[in-house]
Amino acid sequence: MKTRTLSENFMLLNGPRDGKMIPLVQENLQGEVDVMLIDKKHNTTIFKDKGFCTGIEYGGKQMMVLDR
């Protein structure tokens, strides 16, 4: 699976943490995704498609800052 999006399309959204809603995750709904499902045993493609207007989430940096 491959995803594509532009960094300027992300928005910092709140999520629950310790009973409060605090900024946690960057998300957007303007991503693209390529999906391919392969049967490795028979070396055949089961499913292959492209999605547009997909939700993409990036939260690693925010979560590390909040854990300190």
Image (tube, rainbow, N blue to C red):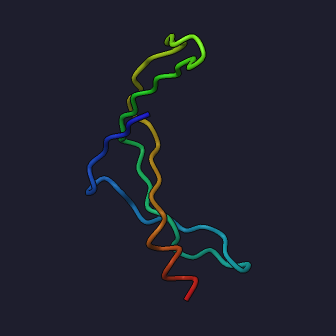
Given residues 3 and 27, the one toward you in this image is: 3
Q: Quadrant of residue 61?
A: bottom left
Does residue 65 lie above or below 57 as drawn? below
Given residues 58 and 22, the one toward you in this image is: 58
Given residues 48 and 16, the one toward you in this image is: 48
x and y percent of residue 53 in the render? 40, 34
x and y percent of residue 3 in the render? 37, 39
Could you tell me which residue is drawn at 57 percent across and 76 percent down? 22
Does residue 62 lie above or below 31 as drawn? below
Does residue 24 lie above or below 58 as drawn? below
Q: Dividing the image into 4 quarters, which one contains the N terminus? A: top left
Looking at this rendering, what residue extends furthest in the bottom direction? 68
Does residue 56 lie above or below 68 as drawn? above
Q: Dividing the image into 4 quarters, which one contains the C terminus? A: bottom right
Could you tell me which residue is drawn at 52 percent across and 70 percent down? 24
Could you tell me which residue is drawn at 54 percent across and 82 percent down? 66
Q: Report the side of 30 relative to 47 (left or right).
A: left
Q: Report the side of 6 relative to 15 (left or right).
A: left
x and y percent of residue 42 in the render? 57, 10
Could you tell me which residue is drawn at 67 percent across and 78 percent down? 20
x and y percent of residue 36 in the render? 46, 23
